[in-house]
Image (spheres, grey):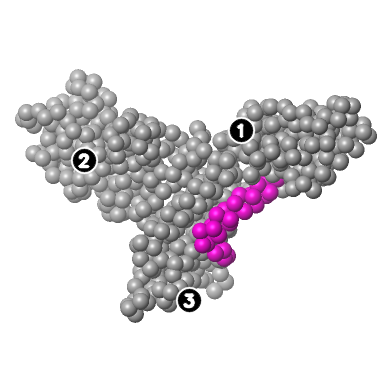
Amino acid sequence: MRVSQLYAPTLREIPAEAEVVSHQLMLRAGMIRRAAGGTYTYMPLALRILRKIESIVRQEMDAKGGQELLMPIMQPAEIWRETGRWDVYGDEMFRLKDRHNREFCLGPTHEEMITTLVKADVRSYRQLPLRLYQIQNKYRDERRPRFGLMRSREFIMKDLYSFDKDEEGLNESYEKMYEAYTNVFNRCGLTFRAVEADGGAIGGTGTHEFMVIADSGEAAIVYCPVCDYAANVEKAELNPIDMPVEELEALTIVSTPGTKSIEAVATLLDVSADRTIKTMVFQTDKGLVLALVRGDHEVNEVKIQNLLGCLTIELADEKAITEALGSAAGFIGPVGTLCSTVIADTTVMNMYNGICGANVVDQHYKNVNATRDFTPTIVGDIRHIQENDPCPHCALPVKTARGIEVGQVFKLYTKYSKALKATYLDNNGREAPMVMGCYGIGVSRTMAATIEQHNDEYGIVWPAAIAPYHVVIVPISAKDAAQMSLAENIYENLNAYGVETLLDDRNERPGVKFKDADLIGYPLKITVGPKATNENLIEVKVRRTGEIFNFAIDNYLDEVKKLLATL
């Protein structure tokens, strides 16, 4: 391809709409253009990158026994109603009706569709295991699409579904996919961690997220640098903290005018925050809920949702709190509460002589003890993990990082097969539900995440495996016949040798060509100037390191290939 013919309109200024580096650079490098909020056109360079990522994904899926198919994007509502998920997705699901008033959705995921397909054809244990995947556009009506391809309404995803006879088979499928995902992201040149995660609307109890480490990541993760434990903060498990044993003192009420926050209460009563009990009030589809954590800790809403099995959870507003509990936020507590559901963090149960709201405005209780003064409905781990908290596996301090989720693997067990009656006959002729797994990779998000991790002040720095082209040749002067002839020769030889090469044949200043090459991020840049025509030496610059090599005209092909193998 010649740059004069390439449809890649680059921009010098950062577009105002772009918030994160990947969005800025893809717009500036002429890789994407916005069609509407959260939807983008992939320009030729971006599509080449996407196809390379897809090729890597296909190779790794096929190597683990995956078979590719393609399912409809438009899915009938009735199969989603059978699993109870038609309402779980809520407003995130694009819904539509045909001319006969039949309801459909644009697929955000395909568990229902694949299970319905397989149950119609699989009858015997001899047909299992089965691993089926597709690479396809998905649709989710994000409330606030942002960050370009990182959180969009239309995106490209690979989703594979495994069907096994039993849990042992599921574990094998899961391990194969875990290995395949590790291979995919390694081959894409990414630094990542596989972390324990929550299943969310997909469901299942065993799941890992594959997180590309980047400061711009929306997700917070924790990891242990010693034992390799890693988890999304929403999932990270925490053991209860032991508190010093104290002699219990009498429960008393103290006046705390205007002190709605933990900090204000602690200051007024001259205690540290870890002596207080924080009470948060949530509205869920199962009613009002009190959540209790130690004052210096934060409540993890996902853990509460999982403990309750509720579909929705949000902070209760002041009106709801006043009407239901007879007090105001900041003064609510578990002792004598009118709330029927109280969830206490395990560490709260170890506290002696704590301080909490007294359910009366401007009053708090002192010397509160859970085993004596109130009885929680549920006791469990409901707090957010924090940096330097003890690792749940080895007790050494954990570290935190930011990550971009690019893939997730789930153990679904029989969640969908039971709901949709996807069964098989075992070797004794007995009917049993298939045991399922689900495995997704965000292909378009992987492209964006790669840029977030691989960029510098000049632009993108592509790993060679997924770069749009491996090499760009830049003649210093398009008007110099000798330079152009040599550049043409190098261009043809490299392409014939299997190296994807661009020739920048534009009649532009060298500085413009160099800036575009750095912005787009080709791994190697070959400059053809006087040194090439006079001394038979071509200058090869490595985009990632800035290193410059001079190769003789008669042996540059092998040298270029060797360089690319290191990138």
Q: CA distance from mark 2 to mark 1?
A: 44 Å
- The secondary element bearing badge 2 is classed as loop
Residue type at numbered disc 3: Asp
Residue type at numbered disc 2: Thr
Q: Are marks 2 and 1 in contact (CB under 8 Å)?
A: no
Q: Is residue 433 visible?
A: yes
Q: Position of residue 118 (x, y in %)?
A: 47, 71
Front residue of 522 and 80:
522
* Res. 121 mark: 3
Q: Position of residue 98 (x, y in %)?
A: 56, 69
Q: Position of residue 414 (x, y in %)?
A: 36, 64
Of circles 2 and 3, the one toward us is 3
Q: Is residue 139 magenta?
A: no
Disc on the earlier residue, 2 or 1: 2
Residue type at numbered disc 1: Asn
Categorize mark 1 by other alpha carbons within 10 Å: few (<14), some (14-19), many (20+): some
Q: Which residues are magenta?
A: 45-70
Q: CA distance from mark 2 to mark 3?
A: 48 Å
> Looking at the figure, which quarter contains the C terminus?
top right
Left or right of residue 10: residue 289:
left
Residue ID for mark 1: 455
- The secondary element bearing badge 1 is classed as strand
* Res. 346 mark: 2
Q: Does 323 appear above or below 223?
A: below
